Amino acid sequence: MKLLIVDDSKTMRMIIIRTLRKTSLGGHDVVQAGNGKEALDVIAAESPDVVISDWNMPEMNGLQLLQQLRANGNQVTFGFVTSESTSAMREQASEAGASFFVTKPFTPESLETSLTQVVA
Amino acid sequence: MIINEKTAEETWLDALVDATGETSNIFLDLGGIRVLRRSDCIPEFTNASFVSLVGDSSSIQVGIAASSDACQTLASRFLGMEEDDDELEHAEIVDAFGELANVVAGGVKQQIADQGETMFLGLPLVMEQRPQLSDGQSVISAECVMGDIPVCLLVIFTRKLN
């Protein structure tokens, strides 16, 4: 399985990868992108099975990325790992087709619980 | 009976302290945060990371200020560095310090949203100089320690123009 991590912070991408290594999902291939626009290119080139995306990013945010993917007919499993977590945002994410929503700061357990529900 | 009602400013600072404590505990493994002193001054620290929160009734910036050494230590903790790992590059420290403020600001936004105020979160801004207030701005701050790392948490308020 291939996971794409999209976050404008390299630090946060590293933290997500480090946290995944502490879970049962640590053995999967990981590719990275720094914003939504870059992610579209990586998705086209790498065809990841799951996209784990930040929400608030420059150039193209996570919600716009998800909406663009679905508009293009791409049904890749998509979820948010974000520092913002209001009920309105969760609703928007769900309506756009997101499968999970994890709030930072997350623990290995909370990340694993959310991801295994869609990856299993 | 004496009732101590918190001001709006104190409510924001409390939310910032809580969100920073949660991040310190979960991401930095520093076991929370301890407040040493509150004031209405900008600290002497020469580095600060801010995120804006903009809503209908208020516009604020929440931030963390720290010395260069403290920034380096926080970045190392944030990235889970081991003692024998290579030293972080300057850009990595800046990115980590900015992301720390971003995660904390998200926690503040969540707490304020629970009280019914909807706000929009900006992107992190890292300053490598002592923060300064502009006209129409005021600040409330808390000198704290995260583990044994001294930091100062700041909430800067900008008066909305009519």
Image (cartoon, helix red, strand yellow):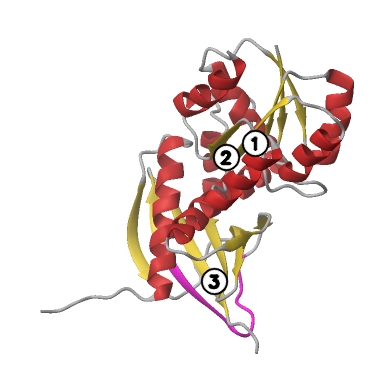
Quadrant of the frame with the N terminus of chain B: bottom left
Question: Please, what secondary structure does the residue beneath circle 3 have?
Answer: strand
* Residue labelled with disc 2: B75
The residue at 88%/30% (across/down) is A41
- Location of residue A39 with respect to A50 vertically, above or below: below
The 10 Å Cα crowd at callout 2, few under 14, some 14 to 19, many 20 or more, is many
Check residue A11 in the rendering and tell me which mark sits there, or answer none. Answer: 1
* CB-based contact (under 8 Å), mark 2 and mark 1: yes
Q: Residue A47's spot in the image, x, y percent? A: 82, 19
* Mark 3 belongs to chain: B
Amino acid type of disc 2? Ala
The 10 Å Cα crowd at callout 3, few under 14, some 14 to 19, many 20 or more, is many
Amino acid type of disc 3? Ile
Residue range of the region highlighted in magenta in the rendering: B130-142
Q: Nearer the viewer, residue B42 or B115?
A: B115
Quadrant of the frame with the C terminus of chain B: bottom right
Spatial CA distance of label 2 from label 1 is 9 Å
Q: Residue A23's spot in the image, x, y percent? A: 51, 16
Magenta span contains residue B134: yes
The residue at 36%/44% (across/down) is B32
- Location of residue A11 with respect to B84 vertically, above or below: below
Q: Nearer the viewer, residue B155 or A100?
A: A100
Q: Could you tell whether B115 is left or right of B61 in the image?
A: left
Spatial CA distance of label 3 from label 2 is 23 Å
* Residue labelled with disc 3: B156
Residue A37 in view of the camera: yes
